[in-house]
Amino acid sequence: MEKVDALWRWLDGRKTIIASILLIAAAFLEQVVQGQWGVQSQLLARVTSTLDWFGMVIGGIGITHKGMKLAEAKAAPQDAGNGQGS
């Protein structure tokens, strides 16, 4: 469980970037390599599809996690620790 926690902490703040890289790589393979250069390969199509899938999943997880962190921040007391006392 420690390794999962360490992995999650490492991924914190990186999930959206990783997803973007995967989706850009998939778009490059599909639009440039297959479309412009005319390279046709069943393996290339599967790699493109896999990169798309992982990019969408990781991106969705990243956006959901950001939303959860935002909701937690809004739920926290607004005046806690601001140094203003009565």
Image: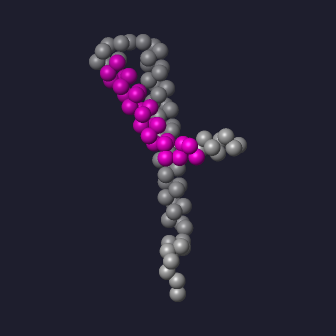
Q: Residue at x 51, y 60 (%)?
A: 71
Q: Residue at x 50, y 32 (%)?
A: 54
Is 16 left, or right, of 77 in this rendering? left
Quadrant of residue 44 within the rendered picture: top left
On the image, the x and y values in percent for residue 61 come to 52, 43
On the image, the x and y values in percent for residue 25 come to 40, 28
On the image, the x and y values in percent for residue 86 come to 52, 87
Q: Residue at x 53, y 46 (%)?
A: 12
The answer to whether 46 is drawn above or below residue 18 in the figure is: above
Is 51 left, or right, of 9 in this rendering? left
In the current view of this chain or complex, which residue is farthest to the front?
Answer: 83
59 or 83, nearer to the observer: 83
Work out which quarter of the rendered image holds the N terminus and state it. Answer: top right
In the current view of this chain or complex, which residue is farthest to the bottom?
Answer: 86
78 or 55, nearer to the observer: 78
Q: How many marks?
A: 0
The answer to whether 68 is drawn above or below residue 31 in the figure is: below
Is 17 part of what is drawn in magenta? yes
In the current view of this chain or complex, which residue is farthest to the right?
Answer: 1
Instruction: Look at the image and tell me whether residue 34 can be seen.
Output: yes
Coloration of the structure image: one colour
Is 55 left, or right, of 6 in this rendering? left
Instruction: Look at the image and tell me whether residue 60 can be seen.
Output: no
Is 43 part of what is drawn in magenta? no
Stretch in magenta: 9-33
Q: Main secondary structure of the magenta part?
A: helix
7 or 28, nearer to the observer: 7
On the image, the x and y values in percent for residue 21 come to 42, 34
